[in-house]
């Protein structure tokens, strides 16, 4: 049994647009980005990168979807967080997120930063419970303080580098 082609969705289009935007902002050609990715262990040809960037367009073009390994390598090489590739560069407008639809850009970024859930149920008690559960399940153990004040714990490796 064969499956039909899966179209690039809204999050895929955002990634494609961000890859192109960041590549151009850094003055990289497709070949230069391809070479940098190869040096980092994720070889993608200039043609593959062009097809990725084509995913930002609504026009019928030859496209290539970005998988999670591509996403991580692109973020490393472009010097950004993977979240930067996933969400619009301007948080003042709307963001279209696969599975969620259109949300305000600020809400999308707060969700991606593990600050707030993307949606909340009605009612204060249910909303409080949803926020608590979101924070417990979204943040890695050992990174944030247990008081929830978003300060890095004093024993984190990042903190040592800054203080040392």
Image: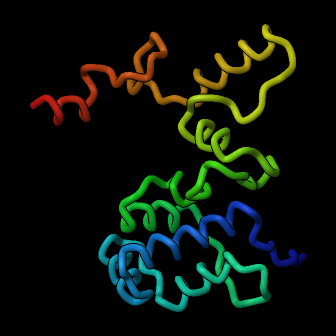
Q: Residue at x 44, y 53 (%)?
A: 81
Q: Position of residue 131 (x, y in %)?
A: 67, 20
Q: Residue at x 33, y 77 (%)?
A: 36
Q: Is residue 132 left or right of residue 43?
A: right
Count of picture labels? 0
Q: Position of residue 53 (x, y in %)?
A: 59, 80
Q: Residue at x 44, y 12 (%)?
A: 146
Q: Can you name the residue that lies furthest to the left here? A: 164
Q: Nearer the viewer, residue 137 or 102?
A: 102
Q: Position of residue 67 (x, y in %)?
A: 60, 66
Q: Can you name the residue that lies furthest to the right here? A: 1
Q: Residue at x 53, y 91 (%)?
A: 47
Depicted 85 relative to depicted 58: above or below: above
The image quadrant of residue 142 is top left
According to the image, what is the colour scheme of the structure? rainbow
The image quadrant where one finds the N terminus is bottom right
Q: Is residue 34 left or right of residue 111?
A: left
Q: Is residue 88 left or right of residue 23?
A: right
Depicted 78 relative to depicted 55: above or below: above
Depicted 120 relative to depicted 6: above or below: above
The image quadrant of residue 63 is bottom right
Q: Is residue 45 left or right of residue 15?
A: left
The image quadrant where one finds the C terminus is top left
Q: Can you name the residue that lies furthest to the front here? A: 92
């Amino acid at each position: 049994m064969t499956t039909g082609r899966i179209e690039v969705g809204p999050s895929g289009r955002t990634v494609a647009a961000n890859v192109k935007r960041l590549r151009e902002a850094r003055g990289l050609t497709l070949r230069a980005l391809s070479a940098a990715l190869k040096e980092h262990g994720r070889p993608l040809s200039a043609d593959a990168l062009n097809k990725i960037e084509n995913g930002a367009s609504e026009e019928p073009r030859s496209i290539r979807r970005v998988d999670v390994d591509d996403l991580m390598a692109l973020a490393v090489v472009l010097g950004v967080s993977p979240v930067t590739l996933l969400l619009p560069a301007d948080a003042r407008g709307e963001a279209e997120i696969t599975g969620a639809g259109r949300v305000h850009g600020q809400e999308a970024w707060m969700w991606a930063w593990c600050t707030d859930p993307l949606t909340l149920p009605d009612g204060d008690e249910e909303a409080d419970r949803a926020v608590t559960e979101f924070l417990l399940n979204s943040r890695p153990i050992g990174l944030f303080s247990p008081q929830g004040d978003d300060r890095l714990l004093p024993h984190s490796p990042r903190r040592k580098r800054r203080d040392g």
